[in-house]
Image (cartoon, coloured by chain):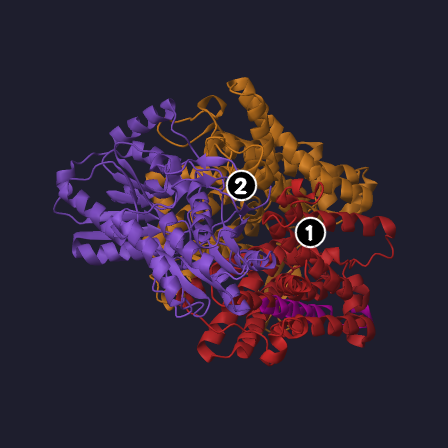
Chain colours: A red, B purple, C orange
Amino acid sequence: MSIEVLILTIITIVGISTPILLAGLGELVVEKAGVLNLGVEGMMLIGAIAGFATTVITGSPWLGMIGAAAAGALAALLFGFLVLALNSNQVATGLALTIFGTGLSSLIGLSFQGRIVAPFGSIFPPALSRDPFLKVLFGYSPIVYFALIMVVLVTWFLKSTRGGLILRAVGENDLSAHSIGYSVVGVRYAAIAFGGAMAGIGGAYFSLVITPMWAERMTAGRGWIALALVVFASWRAPRLLVGAYFFGLLMWLELYAKGGGLNGLPIIPAIPSQFWAAMPYLMTVVVLALISVRDRAGSNAPACLGKPFLTSN
Amino acid sequence: MAILTRRNFIQAAGAAAALPMLGSRAFAQDKLKVGFVFLGPIGDYGWTWAHNKGREAMQTALGDKIESVYVENVAEDASAIPVIRDLANQGCKLIFTTSYGYMDQTIQVAGEFPDVKFEHCTGFKLADNVSVYNSRFHEGRAVLGTISGMMSKSGTLGYLGSYKVPEVVLGVNSFPLAAQKKNPAATLKVVFIDSWFDPPKEAAATETLLNLGADIVTTHTDSPAPLQSLEQRGLHGFGQGADMSSFAPNAHLTAIEDIWGPHYTRRAQAVLDGTWKSSNIWEGMVDGTVVISPYSAAVPADVVAEADKIKAGYMDGSFDIFTGPIYDTEGKLKVEDGKTLTLDELAVMDWFVKGVETAA
Amino acid sequence: MRLKLEKRPEPSRLMVVATPIASVLLTMLIGVVVFDAIGINGQKAVVDIFLTPLLASYKWQDVATKAAPLIIIALGLSIGNRANVWNIGAEGQYVIGSLCAAGVGIAAGGGGGGLIITAMILSGVVGGAAWAAIPAVLRTRFSVNEILSSLMLTYVALQVLGYLVGGPWKDPNGRNFPATAPLTAEQSLPILFPGTTVHLGIAIALVLPFVFWLVTARSVFGFQIRVVGSAPHAARHGGFDSKQTIWLAMLIGGGMAGLAGALEFTGALKAINLGFPSGYGFTAIIVSFLGRLHPIGCLIAGIVLAVTYVGGQVAQTTVHIPNATAGIFQAMMLFFILASDILVRYRVRIVRNPKNAPAPAAGE
């Protein structure tokens, strides 16, 4: 593989990885707060159509991304209201959100079929973004850099700030966080809204960056990969970054193998392409088992994940 | 997918007999209701979009003599049966099922409704009230191959495929055969993504083809996503099923347009006239079913001239891309010099020609 | 004046029954309003989605065919949900169940008849249970969260299906389309009413809820499931092994999903292609909740959900709304049922003045 092709490959993999990185980062914060939202796919689709619609109407992909974030957060707050205010079951509510988001985006999308917008590409001058070598650094949509910045911010927030400490405390032991006087419900609402906004932006990455158009169900299951990614990264933001690009690599490898790119290597061409497609999920299960075996007490999994917060009043 | 066994055929026939049967004359004054079963959303801008355009063209041509209804996003499994049956129950007397995977379902429902005419697209199973119709898309693919053979700098072409079904295999073979007439060293990288419609995967697969060395890509999936990827990379490709130039004004060189309107209009008219007969129709460029969109300004004049020669050859019957000698990927002679593959042979083609590279 | 929530000593039986019905009605009402607001004939859309499948007799068989797998899977999942064991990988277990049945069918060559069909169905049950055993092992041995592991394994199952139907099990006469060869009549479930699609699996789906009802209401096992779910500490004191409960819940959930897959394959679809997994395993979770985790509730809820699927297709041809719109209704129903759950466990009191005696809440 020549250096030019390597650079193109890196750009492809970054493109595949960015939406799951964005959505995964949001879900990581939600889960750190002790809430499991299985509605990522639905929020991504709502973000995809909201971002596209906003861009068509306003002509600005920046506003489109803001619209996607707002719509994703709004959808997430619907979930939040049900699980926090009404103590509904998180698994069922999250699934309902995915079904809801799929249907709603299809319905809204009817008015936006066949419309086109300019791709939300690099904002650097062509001398940088089109240069065969420099484009590996400058050839991306602003959202790619945004995702990277958010990894840093989320890492810093969770590790080094008071807010992050409270959020983790809420996810680790909601009752004692409550007894110290923190608002468990308030923290969780905020986390859920953040998760929805990130999923919305991740969804809009499809409709504004990868393929600037609207198509029904265009996120094609990436929301579920994002959920796997959070577990694969064992709830650590820096690992999530590595994991997202690794999952992207696997998804690319499936296609590369299908195109005969691995022909001529020993054994590997005989591996069915489905194996590569299954790898992210298989490895997530393995990671789940490993982190549990290694150190149960030191596991990074939020102890309250998926459990309702019930104060005995 | 259900199959027509003797047992359930008899049951189905029994059910149909129990339905109130009206002679076709009773409907002569009424509007003819025409039903369509679509694979994707009508907004896929590709395959289903083209069929829906055909439906609209039929509606325009025949005006208030007919009315038409459609169902989109119908899965290619047994769940298509109730959808097709529902259209028949709603009074459709002519039903088009527009994807290969509805073949057995169409045959089964047709057995239940002997007074309804069915037309199945790209399949091969006929019955008294079931026709099959197809389009020789590979003729258009030969035009695209000619353009690619002349315009590709690397000599490596890309083909984004869906499934290895004959319709796609014909395209995969026609494209490099035409290219090799202009550049004998041309090779073709193929990725099959096991889906007709998956925009992010289509985009990623297109980029993968470019990473594998292709510098011009043709697609056999249904969304404009691959063209948008090519547009962003500053490379060229072709529209599939419809003119997609609005999605990628620079990347889009031309497109194979599927024009179903004339066929739909003719068949609906035949039902109105009472002259509809079960038939196997496989139309091509000469019938106006396969149309090449206007070339973009990026196609040089000499390339246009060569591409037009292929078109003219198909129009007057002097050219056929599947004329020997044709070798397979192993270098074995599959079609002897001067021989041309028949339509029956094409309908079952499952091997790739020399220069095609895909997963083992 | 303000609203006050008060925990009920016992869940309200009235609310258990009334809230699902109210949820469906409220969904229909909101559907009319919202669709009218966006310029679609809301009344017609709601009638076609919720009522036409029930009123048009030729649609009954479609509703029954759709409802059968939902009911069977939901029955199994309800057991787990009651015991607080969250198997959300039923979709994968359903797929593995169908593949096991197909494997036995292929191994039998051209052979058919009652014995072979029974073996196919049973291997589906075993296959589904075996796939669910993986999260069970992970949970009981390594305390791995079964929600996440069972979900991940669903996507692995889909790839297994893709590999088999596109590779070793591809129909040699299928012109390379990735699908298994259609089952012969000898390997298919019998049709109960000639001229319809109503197969034996539908009868099984109608009978099973009553079997489950009897077993869970009358047996120690049923008691164990309820106790472990509602009061794990008490269960430990009572001598119930929570690991054993997890195992039972997962195996029953997986076995039922596998059974549904095998019945759907041998009774309805007759072949497996890439479109075979159509989300029954996920929708069954909705069915289980809409049915209040009760076997008879699952039966009714399964039919309601099937109606919305079939009705969604009707509405496509009549009011031209996309297929996915049915999903909006399904999700709304689930939102309402989940939201109203609180009415089962709590009593709403309107407090006019803290000194006054509280007025009795509605529905009491």
Q: Mark 1 falls within which chain?
A: A
Query: Can residue A311 be seen in the rendering of this structure?
Result: no
Residue located at (49% from left, 70% from top): A52
Q: In screen coordinates, is B38 left or right of A247?
A: left
Left or right of B238 in this view: C226: right
Q: Residue B21 falls in which quadrant of the image?
A: top left
Q: Secondary structure at mark 2?
A: loop
> In the rendered view, does C317 fall on the left or right side of B191?
left
Crowd around label 1: few <14 · some 14–19 · many ≥20 (10 Å):
many
User: Label 1, on which residue?
Assistant: A280
Q: Nearer the viewer, mark 1 or mark 2?
A: 2
Q: Nearer the viewer, residue A199 or B218?
A: B218
Q: Quadrant of the N terminus of chain C?
A: bottom right
Q: For residue C261, which quarter of the picture?
A: top right
Please provide percent x and percent y for residue A203: 57, 65
Q: At x 69% / y 61%, what residue is drawn?
A: A244
Amino acid of disc 1:
Pro
Q: Which residues are magenta?
A: A178-201
Q: Which mark is drawn over residue B329?
A: 2
